[in-house]
Image (cartoon, helix red, strand yellow):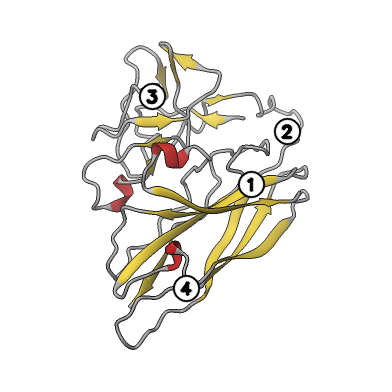
Amino acid sequence: MDVGVTNASLTSLATCGDKMIGSLTVLVNDGGVSRVNLDSTITGGIIMGPGSSDVKCEDAPISVAGDAIASHPPCPLPATHCAAFTHGSTNVFTGGLFPPAGGPPPQVADLSVESFYISYPIIDIPTPTIFTGPITFQYVIKNTGNVATNFSTIALYEVLGLPTVPPAPPILPAFITITRDTPNVLENIVLIDEKLIGPISAGGALADSWTIPIGNEFANIPYNYVRYYILAVDIDSEVAETREWDNSSPVLPLENT
């Protein structure tokens, strides 16, 4: 998989806007190469990885676009510092999917969440009370690659650490890489449910719904409270993709007011 290398230049800021720290001796785009579990944002958010599986810098895996960054000051506000991720270089990559100039394009799939929204409920409860569900999400998953995917796993998560009282902040950008291991390194990403989806043809899409049933703990929303949800595709990396790091939806708020 070709993924941009994270570094300490101004072209590779974290999703929270912080500058990264990197190696003093190995440079990319005039910034030191950032390494998993060694380097951090300038505000102290350690790069949790997973990083490159086959490229190291000074005996540590190099960081690549989409690596998780530990919660760091000034979290919890603004909330972007509670669940940040790395960006990478736009011209220095790991892997080998990008062909030489004039060569044929790589034969790979590319899954992404094209849309993700709540179709039920539109909460408008006239008296203060807890909402207990159900919650139904609608989603469209798109394969923009030039080959069909195989079977893969998608998952629904709750995102903690964001403001829990209205008004909800703007929906966060869709640049959070989530894998099966993410909840083990980021305590504010909590798995709700997962499902296996079938192959999606080249250029094709899958439209479906997902319901959190009534009474489920993740569907309970107290009065004057906000919960946040996110959908991620291919959490087990079963599909070879050109953009392995870009696998999640925007964070979706649902408030009971």
Sequence-first tag of 1 and 2: 2
Between marks 1 and 2 in the image, the one whose residue lies nearer the viewer = 1
Question: Which residue occupies the foreground of this view, 7 or 254?
Answer: 254
- Residue 110 location, quadrant: top right
Sequence-first tag of 3 and 2: 3
Whole-Å distance between the Cαs marked 4 and 2? 44 Å
Q: What residue type is labelled 2?
A: Pro
- Residue 218 location, quadrant: bottom left
Q: What residue is rendered at 71% in x and 44% in y?
A: 145
Image quarter in which the C terminus is found: bottom left
- Residue carrying label 2: 106
Q: What residue type is labelled 1?
A: Thr
- Residue carrying label 4: 133
Report if residue 168 is visible in the image: yes
Image quarter in which the N terminus is found: top right
Whole-Å distance between the Cαs marked 4 and 3? 43 Å
- Residue carrying label 3: 34
Circles 1, 2 touching at the beta carbon (< 8 Å) = no
Q: What residue type is labelled 3?
A: Ser
Residue 169 locus on image (x, y percent): 32, 63
Circles 4, 2 touching at the beta carbon (< 8 Å) = no
Residue 72 locus on image (x, y percent): 26, 40
Between marks 4 and 2 in the image, the one whose residue lies nearer the viewer = 4
Sequence-first tag of 4 and 1: 4
Residue at disc 1, secondary structure: strand
Residue 174 falls left or right of residue 31: right
Q: What residue is rendered at 43% in x and 63% in y?
A: 217
